[in-house]
Image (cartoon, coloured by chain):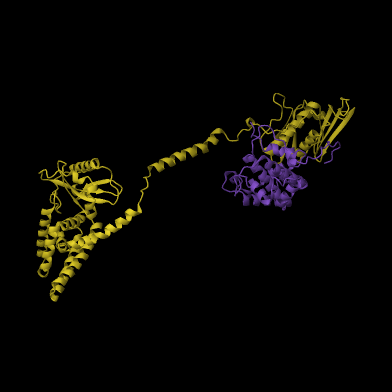
Chain colours: A purple, B yellow
Amino acid sequence: MQVQSPPNTEPPNLNLIDQLSIPDGLPSECSRRAKTQIDLLLLAIEALDLGGAEAMLASAKELGLDEVVRGRVNLWLLRSSNPLRRFSQRQPMSLEEGKALVLITCFLARRLTVLIRQLLLGYQQLSDQGLSFDHHFRLSDYLARFRSHFRARMNAKRSGVIAYSTDEKLNELAIELLTKLLFCTGTEGAERLWISLFDGEVA
Amino acid sequence: MTMQRQYQLPNCSIILDGLSIDPSPGNENVMSLLVNAECRISGLERSLNGGYNFFAALVRAVSQYGQEVLSGYAHPQVIEGEPLLVHINPGEGPYHHLVVQPEVADLGESGDGRAIDIKLSAVQLFDLTEAGDQFFDDKQTLPELEPALAPLPKRFVRSDEPLSDRAVPAVLGVGSLVAATMAFGLLPVPELRDPNVEVSQGAESGEVVPVNDNTSGSEPPTGASEPEDNEIAAVPLDEETLDEANGDADAATGEDSDVEVVTTSLDATEDAAATEENNAEQASDVEDADAETDLTTAETTDGETTAESTSTENSDSEFSSFDDFKEEEEDSTTVANSTTANSSTFENEPPARVTSFAQVRTLNSQLKQTIVENRDQPRFGEAVSYRVRVSESGTITGYQSIDSSAESAIGETPLPGLVKGDSGEDSSIDYRVVFTERGVVEVSPWWGWSYYE
């Protein structure tokens, strides 16, 4: 991705978290949809990268977010605020925590850019030719891993989860998340993802 | 000064040609006037060319659509009131459609006046978005164009489901709540059981047998007379009692000891009485009545002693014949009746069925009404039963406790105050009045409803 006239990059802000804007009228904490969305994106990252869970902790440190995401248990609690989770914690997620997870998601997605593009191109080719996903080893591997992660961790009794009861539905969800992750890899990825979490939440 | 800016990505590149018209220091390199914008998308033979309007509409639409991909909610791709020059629609599978109106973009000579529809894959779309974002990030080029990323206001979010579908769960929820409330309302209030009361009940029922001890002298004859009174279930039991008593008597005769005879016969009758008591509890009303009559007879102390002494003295001869038993029983009954205060004779004979069923029913409800109206408050605790005699005019002429617990609880019932004495009328009807442990008064004909039908 070479740019002939590279934008004048500002000196990196020491406090990454403040780079994400807080538009007017934002609720004081992350909505249900935001919590669900963040957790699902992280789940997709785990399905892409076997060491994803460890990488999340490492990147939290790397990004200087370890004061917001304090270690493994805290990360687990934050992700468990997803209402679809089997052991959902029903706890609020503050805007700071939401921002931190968004930054981690985008950081990891950027690292996986090549893989994400490959998988999406593969998916496009397979669907053009009307072939099943099994013809693309890496893609079917991702889909299978995502399905098993999803089924192991989500509460199958929730109506939001029942909608994904079949393999096909889960594959669709996995591809949709993959596309979202691709958009997270962009220059404005974190800001875009962060803002999109509040669509329909402001007056 | 002319200048060119390029934003290149694997599947898409944007090339901007423009001029800098602001000569002030620091702004020499800022492109502030766009001459031509070229958008090349891989797989597309020709590039899209256009002026400022085309480019501004393109980057705005792409930027807004990028948010749509992330959130799933459709974002407005133009500022309200402006014509829709460029917009992107979701397509099937991994595809999206970039639609450009012909008046803003120049696709070369192939343009036939129709809108240009370009099919973009997810990766192509992302590259286009990314090129736009890089442009937005570049403050040196057309700085007046802003990405304008903002959360979608609520008014743009339409629920996928129609209102009727969304209302169904709420209506169902409220409906089932109402149904459940009504169902629970129909259930009786749970009965509060006091464990102390149950203990005392057990103790009292245990006392029933000792009470019968006193009556032992007159008990066997009563048993013997029962087959005449009613032929329901008492016959086999009474024969047994008789046999047993006779056997005891025979044995006693052989041993020449009066005291022993008394003891044995006492034991025998005690057993018989106990058996009878149990039997009576389970058997029909009629049988029950007999046992109760016996009890009353026994409780009239004078008669009891007489009967007992007689039976003890005559033990040898007394048990030898059935007729003797009967005579004995009649004697004691007479004594008992004469001593029963405030009560007409409660014989065990079923009354003549002269009374009509309707009248029995009327008196039944009338009696119940009278009792309920005259009690101070509902009586709780162990259930007690009484036999109440009512004349045809509705006057309560007498009552009788059915067992000792009923006897002791008589003060808690309004019965004593309701007895008006014998009105002199011939026919009267006996009723069974039960004060149940939940404070309910139950009245039914002593001989059963079926008797009058």
The residue positioned 74% from the left and 36% from the top of the image is: B119
Total marks placed: 0
Q: Quadrant of residue B186?
A: top left
Q: Is residue B91 visible?
A: no
Residue A102 higher or lower than A73, as above or below: above
Q: Quadrant of the N terminus of chain B?
A: top right
Q: List x then y, in percent, for residue B377.
A: 27, 43
Is residue A164 found left or right of B144 in the rendered image? left
Q: List x then y, in percent, for residue B397.
A: 15, 45
Q: Quadrant of residue B125?
A: top right
The residue positioned 71% from the left and 48% from the top of the image is: A45
Q: Residue furthest right?
A: B1
Q: Closest to the observer: A130 or B174?
A: B174
Q: Quadrant of residue A124?
A: top right
Residue B49 higher or lower than B213, as above or below: above
Q: Closest to the observer: B75 or A61?
A: A61
Q: Residue furthest top?
A: B81
Q: Is residue A156 visible?
A: yes
The residue positioned 23% from the left and 52% from the top of the image is: B408
Q: List x then y, in percent, for residue A27.
A: 64, 35
Q: Closest to the observer: B102 or A77?
A: A77
Q: List x then y, in percent, for residue A10.
A: 81, 37
